[in-house]
Amino acid sequence: MNKKFAIAILNWNGEKLLKQFLPSIIAYSNQANIYVIDNKSSDNSLSLIQKEFPQINIIENLDNGGYAKGYNQGLKSISEPYLALVNSDIEVTENWLDPIERIFDQQPTVAIIQPKILDFKNKTHFEYAGAAGGFIDKYGFPYCRGRIFDTIEEDKGQYDDEIEIFWASGACFFIRNSIYKELNGFDEDFFAHQEEIDLCWRAHHVGYIIKYCGNSTVYHVGGATLSYQNPQKTYLNFRNSLLMMYKNLPSRCKFTTLFLRLCLDGIAGIRYFLSLKPKHCFAIVRSHFAFYKRISQFKHKRANSPI
């Protein structure tokens, strides 16, 4: 019987994570084929899979192109109609695919779905990256239900619903294969961070719906590849947020919104500096210079966007 789901796990030197988290995916994903897309790992990831998890399909990329390029390369050879892009530090739960399958089967305009994402290290609470569905404010800052800034809510069933959202977390991201290809996948110039928000924004431009499904639950470690304390994460988040806004904002408010955002980013940099985190302050400065350098390149992408 042909399976509807392809679970695609992007891996780079994640031997320990694969050993820990693949068993739950195998146990609770009977209606899926499972793939590990390897970004040129130098550890024993592939030999571990071949030895301990022979039922898993391996796709080997030629280099480490980050999250965006890694998935774009790996998914070219996957044909199942529903894709589940799952971080290597995700633990899934029993029947996690069933409500996702029902939505895709019954609601053809739904392109992307996010499950409930709880914290693997504190399973009664939501996890920072995605929580109970993502939105974006008028200044281009992404936020989620289930957390306010760095304050994380306890899961008391308050988000056991099914609603439309603006973006779905790349930690566990369901998308129709046909729509992924229609949108040309992730923007590889992002490398990593916020490329899933950009993809969701582009899906909105052409009329697709993105949903959160609170009846499907996963647990996420978070920061397993790049720590939340790493200035490189700060750099990528700030740079990519500016690029995403320039690429997707309507023309009537693009420059006003970007100017306000530049001011707010300056305030964020000052806060980092006063908090004795000068590397994060410098990361924001670097992100802005990188944004200015790429504007000419992104003009072309904006011209090809239906806004």
Image: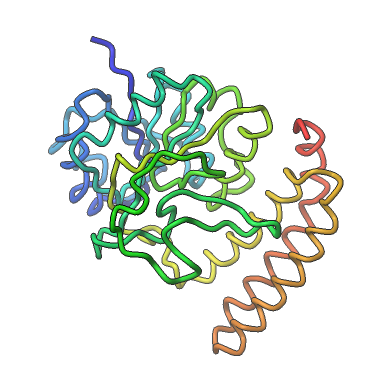
Q: Is residue 139 above or below residue 88?
A: below
Q: How is the image coloured?
A: rainbow
Total residue callouts: 0
Residue at x 70%, y 52% (from the top left corner): 243
Residue placed most toward the observer, 191 or 303:
303
Drawn side of residue 176 relative to residue 160, left or right: right
154 shown above or below 63: below
Q: Nearer the viewer, residue 159 or 150?
A: 159
Q: Is residue 138 above or below residue 186?
A: below
In the rendered image, residue 262, in percent from the top left (x then y), is placed at 76, 67
268 w.r.t. 292: above or below: below
Residue at screen point 79% across, 58% down:
257
Q: Position of residue 1 (x, y in %)?
A: 23, 9
Q: Which image quadrant for residue 22?
A: top left
Residue 22 in the figure: left or right of residue 116: left
Residue at the top extreme of this rendering: 1
Q: Is residue 215 left or right of residue 240?
A: left
Q: Residue 23: where, in percent of width, then height?
A: 16, 41
**Residue 140 or 183: which is nearer the viewer?**
140
- Residue visible at 31% across and 64% down? 154
Expressed as whole percent of the image width and height from the top left, the position of residue 72 reads 51, 33
Give the residue at x 19% y 42%: 48
Displayed quadrant of residue 307: top right
